[in-house]
Image: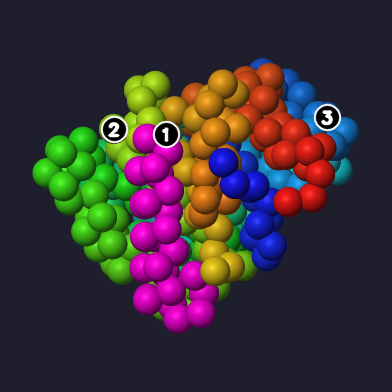
C-alpha cells in the first residue's frame, strides 16, 4: 500500500448525509467538530454535506473547528422562478463552501444528465463554491465491461472547461457499491482512479496531477485504511457512516495514523 499524503493534494474526507438529519442530529456535527479541532484527522480536510435545512445552524459549530460545509445539489441559476430549488449562492450564504453534484441518486432519481451537472458546476463556480462531481458505473455497465467508457463519458460531459484543482473535486462512486457493503477490488479502484486522472489531464491539460479524486461507496472505519491507501485515492465521499461521529472520524482518522507513521 502506498502512502496517502501526496504532495500538492490535501486529502479530503467528505460526509454526504443525503436526506437524513433533523436539528437534534447536530449533536453528531458537534462531536465531529470537537474531534477535528483536537487533530482527529490531521492532514486531511473534513467537509460535511448536510441537508440544506441544517447548514445555517451547523455553520457556527463548524467554523471554529476548521470543518467545511457543503450542499448536496444546486440549481444552475443564481435565483428565479424555480419552486423547490436552491441556488449555489443560497448554499454559500448559508455557510457552504462545497456542493456535491451529479450524485447517482440525483442522476437517476431526478434525471440529471451530464450537461445539467456541468451547468450546475458552472453555477457553483460562479458562487464561489467548490464542486464535488460524482461519476461511476452501474453493475450492468461494469459487467458489460463498460466501466471505463461510462466514466470517461461522464467526465467529458460533466466537467466545466474552466475547472481547476481548487474548484473541482471528482468522486468515483460505483453505483453498485453505494449503500450495499460491496466495494470494488483495490486493484480495480487503483485502475479507475489512474484512468480518471488521465482523463482529467486530457480534458483539462495540466490539471490532472493536482485534482483530488475521492472514492465513495460503502467506506467504513474497517475498510478506510486500505481504500485510502490506494494510489490516486485522495480521500473519501462517505454516505451512511458519516451520520455517526464515531464512524466518520474513524474513517477520517486514518490520515492521523498515516501521519503518525512518519513522513511518506
Ligand atoms: P455509502 O457510504 O452509504 O455507501 O454512500 C456512498 C455515497 O453515496 C456517498 O455520496
Does the residue tagged 3 have its C-beta within 8 Å of any atom of ligand 1?
no
Extreme residue toward the left, this view: 144
Crowd class of label 1 (few under 14; some 14 to 19; many from 20; radius 10 Å):
many
> Residue at coordinates 49% horizontally, 70% vertically from top-left?
208
Q: What residue span does the magenta drawing correspond to?
A: 185-208
Name the chief secondary structure element in magenta: helix
For mark 2, what is the residue?
176
In space, the residues marked 2 and 3 are separated at their CA atoms by 33 Å
Q: Which of marks 3 and 1 is nearer the N terminus?
A: 3
Q: Earlier in the sequence, mark 2 or mark 3?
A: 3
> Residue at coordinates 29% horizontally, 67% vertically from top-left?
157
The circle drawn on residue 217 is 1
Can the viewer see residue 221 in this picture?
Answer: yes
In space, the residues marked 3 and 1 are separated at their CA atoms by 26 Å
Does the residue tagged 1 have its C-beta within 8 Å of any atom of ligand 1?
yes
Residue 259 is covered by the magenta coloring: no
Instruction: Out of 82 and 204, give the one closest to the viewer.
Output: 204
Question: Could you say where residue 211 lies in the image, as x and y percent from the top left?
Answer: 54, 64
Mark 1 secondary-structure assignment: loop
Instruction: Out of 55 and 125, give the one closest to the viewer.
Output: 125
Mark 2 secondary-structure assignment: helix
> Residue at coordinates 68% horizontally, 19% vertically from top-left?
246
> Residue at coordinates 12% horizontally, 44% vertically from top-left?
144
Question: Could you say where residue 168 lies in the image, as x and y percent from the top left?
Answer: 52, 63
Q: Which quadrant of the render holds ligand 1?
A: top left
Instruction: Out of 262 and 170, give the one closest to the viewer.
Output: 262
Tag 2 and tag 1, C-beta contact below 8 Å: yes
Tag 2 and tag 3, C-beta contact below 8 Å: no
For mark 3, what is the residue?
34
Amino acid at each position: 500500500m502506498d502512502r496517502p499524503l501526496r504532495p500538492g493534494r490535501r486529502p479530503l474526507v467528505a460526509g454526504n448525509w443525503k436526506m437524513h438529519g433533523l436539528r437534534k442530529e447536530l449533536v453528531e456535527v458537534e462531536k465531529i467538530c470537537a474531534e477535528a479541532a483536537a487533530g482527529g484527522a490531521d492532514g486531511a480536510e473534513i467537509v460535511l454535506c448536510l441537508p440544506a435545512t441544517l447548514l445555517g445552524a451547523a455553520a457556527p459549530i463548524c467554523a471554529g473547528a476548521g470543518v467545511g460545509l457543503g450542499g448536496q445539489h444546486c440549481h444552475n441559476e443564481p435565483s428565479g422562478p424555480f419552486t423547490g430549488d436552491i441556488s449555489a449562492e443560497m448554499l454559500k450564504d448559508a455557510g457552504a463552501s462545497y456542493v456535491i453534484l451529479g450524485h447517482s441518486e440525483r442522476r437517476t432519481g431526478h434525471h440529471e444528465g451530464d450537461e445539467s451537472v456541468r451547468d450546475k458546476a458552472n453555477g457553483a463556480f460562479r458562487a464561489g463554491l467548490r464542486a464535488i462531481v460524482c461519476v461511476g458505473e452501474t453493475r450492468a455497465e461494469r459487467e458489460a465491461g463498460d466501466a471505463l467508457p461510462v466514466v470517461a463519458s461522464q467526465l467529458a460531459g460533466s466537467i466545466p472547461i474552466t475547472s481547476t484543482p481548487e474548484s473541482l473535486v471528482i468522486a468515483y462512486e460505483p453505483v453498485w457499491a453505494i449503500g450495499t457493503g460491496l466495494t470494488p477490488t483495490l486493484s480495480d479502484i487503483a485502475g479507475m482512479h489512474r484512468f480518471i486522472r488521465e482523463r482529467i489531464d486530457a480534458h483539462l491539460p495540466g490539471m490532472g496531477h493536482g485534482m483530488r479524486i475521492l472514492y465513495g461507496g460503502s467506506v467504513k472505519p474497517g475498510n478506510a485504511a486500505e481504500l485510502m491507501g490506494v494510489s490516486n485515492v485522495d480521500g473519501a465521499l462517505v454516505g451512511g457512516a458519516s451520520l455517526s461521529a464515531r464512524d466518520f472520524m474513524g474513517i477520517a482518522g486514518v490520515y492521523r495514523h498515516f501521519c503518525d507513521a512518519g513522513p511518506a
